[in-house]
Image (cartoon, rainbow, N blue to C red):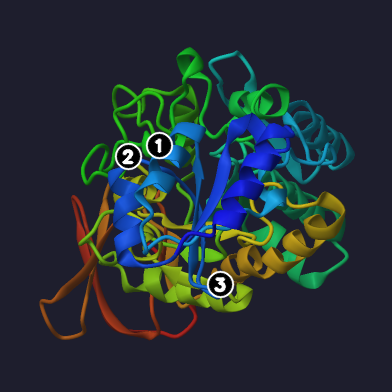
Amino acid sequence: MFSWKGILFAFFLLSCNVWAQEAFIVRFNLNEGIKSYLRANQLDVAGVNYNTNEIEAILTPEEFEQLSAQKSAMIKFSFPQNLAMAPDEEYKNPDEVTEFINEIHQRYPDITSLKVVGKTLEGRDIFAIKISDNPESDEQEPAVLVNGMHHAREVMTPEITTDMIEYLVTNYNVKDEVTKWVNNTEIWVLPMLNLDGNNKMWTSNSMWRKNTRGGYGVDINRNYPTGWNSCNGSSSYQGAQDYRGTSPASEPETQAMMNLVGSIKPVFNISYHSYSEIVIYPFGCKPRKTPTTEAVELIGGEVAQKLNYIPGTAWELLYNADGGDIDWMYTEHQVIPFVIEVNSTSEGFHPKYSTWRDKTVERNRPGWMHLLGRLNGPALSGVVNLSEYETVKIYSPGTTKLLQTYKINPDGSFFIILKTGTYDFSFEGSKQKKLSNVEIASKVNVNF
């Protein structure tokens, strides 16, 4: 039922200029009917809360007026004031993120290197930082990628990525676990992808989500080629918050991420978003429930358990989402990728910095730490001669049941995450080599 008292209070807040950009944060009971309604009307879904069984959307005054006129018994409103407030200035803006990673590199040049992976529409450099014991070299070690801020208003996400950077460099040669990670892994962090959009969020519109293409913006995380415009999981309307752009990979930010992933071939990826306290794995479009690689769903569940979040696909937990980064990474580059949505509806996009920043980054450390630790296996890894072997096919032992086909990396390395079990492997190319009844309970290395 409608809460008319809440509606009147919302109009009062709007008249007092409390609501950023004349936007209403509207809370609904979470059910499939509401999810379908929000999707069909292309409303801006902000997040879900599976503890309270609620879903929130951001509405313009016009959308709010149309919705309130329906007086639908399905809809329950409340208006949490803090969700529409501009963020604390203590959150990092684009200049501060760039300053941070340059300072880190200056302080720790032996274990870091900086790479400009692209430029935004407004000419800002998109930086990634590599943390490793030989940061300037291709070490033929497994790579892990973590990135933040596809969406401009999600100000907590660069706090998590920069916290990860600082934690690793300051604890190298201090904590054995960190030292092992840095020595044996190529750790890549792209702390802020959507620099232009975040600048606009700070300077003119605290609820801005997209990049700044043409003043209307494109949702970078609906712009990747895999599944682009395939399942009503994005919009063709320029004014929509999930506008997908005119063509796949039309945006320089999308291209920057694609180029980085293609060059480093990470085993794992985390893309940080807010808010909902969920862990999302491919695929974004119903009815593709889960990837063919069983380890993706398994590890997603492990990460969610570490964080006390809910795991699942985007369409199960939120809505259909096409053109997303994790679907592209998984399909094109066999990455095991996750979206982690941090914070809940009680915090929203802009939680109070002093109250929530440290709590959030500390709560989320076990997620990225788990992936770094998961490189210990179960897995099959090694380096082969690429002129002789191009792919690895994985079978149930003693059968012809194909479980997975893995394309060997351009440097001849491979790192295949598996569930604990026994497998047959066939290395194929100009030559063929078979390994039968290989027990994978930890990391097994093969070189030939």
Q: Residue at x 56, y 20 (%)?
A: 120
Give the side of residue 67 with respect to residue 394, left or right: right
Disc 3 residue type (three-letter) = Tyr
Q: CA distance from mark 2 to mark 3?
A: 25 Å
Callout 2: few (<14), some (14-19), or many (20+) C-alpha neighbours within 10 Å?
A: many
Q: Is residue 145 visible?
A: no
Give the mark, 3 or 1, whose residue is nearer the N terminus.
1
Q: Position of residue 298 (x, y in %)?
A: 41, 76
Q: Nearer the viewer, mark 2 or mark 3?
A: 2
Question: Which of the two discs, 3 and 1, sits closer to the camera?
Answer: 1
Q: Quadrant of the N terminus?
A: bottom left
Q: Quick one: 424 or 151, which is closer to the camera? A: 151
For label 3, the SS is: loop
Residue picked out by circle 1? 242
Instruction: Please give the label number shown on residue 234.
Output: 2
SS type, badge 1: loop
